[in-house]
Image (spheres, rainbow, N blue to C red):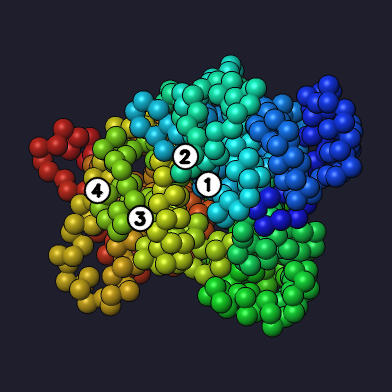
Amino acid sequence: MTSTHIAGVALEMRWLQPLYRRLSDRPDLLRALERDTGLRRADLSDDSVMNHTSFCDLIERLHAQGEPHICAWLALQFDPSVGFGQLYYLRSYTKLREMLAELMIYPPVIFPFGCFRFSVDWDEDSFEVRLKPYQTPSRLASRLLEEGALAWVQRIFDLSLTQHHAPLAVYSIASRPPCKEPLHALLGAPVQFDAPYSAMRYPAQLLDQTLPGGNPRIKHAIRGCYSALVCHSDAPTPISVQLLGCFLAPDGTRKANLESMASRLGLGRSQLRSQLSAQGMRFSDIHNAHRRRLAFQLLVLEGAPVESVVRSLGYASRFAFERAFAKWFDTTPTVARKDRLQLGPAVIAEDWSDPAAIMRMLPPAVHNAMDAHGLEDLQQPLSSLLQAYLLGFASRAKYGGKPLNHWQDLQQQLGIEHVNQLIKGLLLQSGPGRPVAILKPIWQTSTQALVRLPTLHWFWELGAEAQQRTMQAVAWYELGALLMYRMLGKPYGHLLREAPFLPRARVLEQERQRFGLDRHTAGALLLSAWGLPSDAIRAQRAASQPVTTEAQRLAALYEPQRTNSSPMCSRTKRL
């Protein structure tokens, strides 16, 4: 895809070859299109493109010639071998809801005809896929492109699911045109024209359809390429995302400095600094956040040699890199890599840090409607998990790379609308959930600890910032236990059954002996993967073997309240 226009992408000529079949009985029109728009015949090995403006001229010309839905028709002819791998990436998800959630959580969505805001609304009976342009349509072609993007979604569904599923209804922002092939004949559903947005509605049961091409390994392998494609897209993107695209280029991170990156963006050094400052960002924050995330990915997730990572990230020495790594994650690369492998063989084949997978294990009651304002209530298990993940998400380089510590910082950084979109995407991805009864005591204990916290004298001696940090540490205290159960399954579940009747130190010791790490080490690993500040990671590691006063105070909140009437009492004494 080549940058040509703020709202669109240059279209591969291979995409347009079906026009020669469609217009075979109108050779004069074809010749005129070739002359005026640059349309020409091309085979699948031809990677030439038609720029966005010429394509807009082409579809408007065809609209005037009695082909008003040519964009939608072209999308339905989509050949999966054409393009930059978007289809293979989307099909690699296990279920349709996960694929749609990915498009919601990581905008902008790159369609063959442009970049659009993408959202999904759902209820018990149906779900609706919605598209909105980044700018108000200024010409007829803009409305036709949006119509084509809708048809592209339908085509992706057809290629991803085991059989064709026509939508229940279609909504288009375009006006109804008189033509020989109405839009409802192409999409297979009634169409409401002049709608406020473009959308298609489908039966709700499709969300849980298994995609036959689902493959976690392919998904992880392609995601980085997809992210790089988004960074170089034509969607309206902040300067931080453009800068991230420069970092992702060959030698981008190794040779990253303000002057060289400004040159790649066609700006002067002071211009780049001014544009970043206007958005409340600094080059050093963005660069540091990018290197932090890349270091964790290369060393911990992919197992790359330390020396190669030192060179690729542009550090002067291994010592300098390991010092930065310890500052970020409160551990060494070797220990972090070993801890990850202790989570079992499944860490190689799937995204072990996926928050939606943990959300699915929660009781149904926590899956009620939630928005950005609900993140403040840390006594709700879903709120505490989402707050942790989203604080790390918003600290990424694309959002400025500034470490965030409070949910209000999150709203200020991303905006209420974006935060709500992220929450909605994660809820869509997690689905109705499969609650695990054995995990219920974990959340109950965390809730009880949060309730007790304001009654303690030492808590009120802390400053406001320290109180907030302590409440978060308590709310996230048991995240590692959920991760361990998800990755280790029943063997870890056996220990959880005994845990409520054992001293806390004994539980952690048993975890380390049986599984090679305890829940707090796992929790630190999870918070590191999510991108939380080092203070939050350090609090988890300190809880593993509490020595400091602060760590001991938190550990005391989680000591079991034993009674002689417990049926496990005698067994506990023997242990």
Q: Residue at x 46, y 62 (%)?
A: 414
Left or right for 280, reference 474:
right
Q: Which residue is mark 3?
A: 372
Q: Earlier in the sequence, mark 2 or mark 4?
A: 2
The residue closer to the viewer here, 201 or 541, is: 201
Residue 445: assigned label: 4
The residue closer to the viewer here, 572 or 110, is: 110
Which percent across, then down, holds residue 462?
26, 76
Q: Nearer the viewer, mark 2 or mark 4?
A: 2
Q: Earlier in the sequence, mark 1 or mark 3?
A: 1
Where disc 2 sits, the SS reads loop
Q: Amino acid at mark 3?
A: Ala
- In the image, farthest residue toward the bottom: 270
Circle 3: is it few (<14), some (14-19), or many (20+) Cα within 10 Å?
Answer: many
Q: Which residue is mark 1?
A: 132
Depicted 354 relative to depicted 364: above or below: below
Toward which corner of the image does residue 542 lie, by quadrant?
bottom left
Q: Nearer the viewer, mark 4 or mark 3?
A: 3
Distance (Cα) linking label 1 and label 2: 11 Å
Q: Residue at x 62, y 80 (%)?
A: 274
In this rendering, does residue 538 appear at all? no
Q: Which residue is mark 2?
A: 195
Distance (Cα) linking label 4 and label 3: 25 Å
Q: Residue at x 59, y 20 (%)?
A: 185
Q: Amino acid at mark 2?
A: Ala
Residue 202: assigned label: none
